[in-house]
Amino acid sequence: MLRLPVFTFLTPKTIDEAIGMMVDAGGDASFVAGGTDLFPNMKRRQQTPRTVISVLSLPELRAVRGNATEGLTLGAGVLLSDLCADPLVTATFPVVARTARLISTPLLRNMSTIGGNLLIDTRCDYYDQTYEWRKSIHFCLKKDGDTCWVAPGSSTCSSWPPRSASRSRSVTTRPARASGTRSNIAYSRSSASTGAANRWSASRPW
């Protein structure tokens, strides 16, 4: 059985408090909402934050606001299952609700958030393994090693960049274009930490 490493679990009441906790942790911390990605990664020692800050209960991140004319703003902490059933979303942008319903399984949708799905760690067969398995191949370029086993001759990681701490605050869904054929969907990221988190956002290839 894979066990979680020892860590401190914090539950802020506001976004400002969450940011303060991240600053106090000195960067050795991760935000968590549903935890469907972070906690398995911690069990495999892919990520080992000493402090985990839960933002799942922050009301500002669970809000769904807007209308059919001006568009919707979906908080990064909105659960996928809530998004599927939200009357405002199903009435104004049903394609968003239908898309969310296609993600994963009901059990995971009950815990997975929009922000977590936008920032989910890139999958890799050589990276998403137990610590002992990765150690047996001398790790990989993404963590603890110097070789990308997907492309051994490459100097860059094929599943870069790594994801740390949720940094998404909201997803904005704008009204469909005049043709009515598709919606224009955009999302924004913001970081409570600095340094690596900001470089992550800047280096994202899309």
Image (cartoon, rainbow, N blue to C red):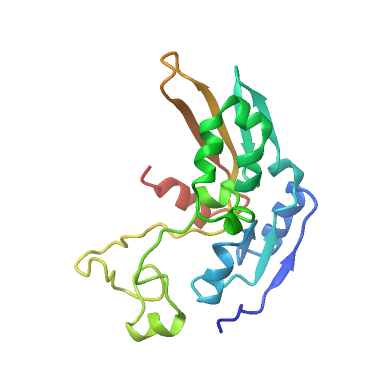
Give me the residue at 37% from left, 58% from top: 160
Relative image position of residue 25 (x, y in whole percent) = 68, 65
Pick the front one: 66 or 154: 66
Give me the residue at 62% from left, 31% from top: 89
Residue 167 in view in this figure: no
Pick the front one: 106 or 166: 106
Q: Residue furthest left?
A: 153
Quadrant of the image occupied by residue 206? top left
Total numbered labels: 0
Give me the residue at 62% from left, 41% from top: 83
Quadrant of the image occupied by residue 173? top right
Q: Is 119 left or right of 79, judged from the image as shown? A: left
Pick the front one: 8 or 77: 77
Q: Residue furthest right?
A: 13
Residue 169 in view in this figure: yes
Relative image position of residue 205 (x, y in whole percent) = 36, 46
Relative image position of residue 197 (x, y in whole percent) = 52, 54
Q: Is 96 left or right of 124, judged from the image as shown? A: right
The quadrant the N terminus occupies is bottom right
Relative image position of residue 186 (x, y in whole percent) = 49, 33
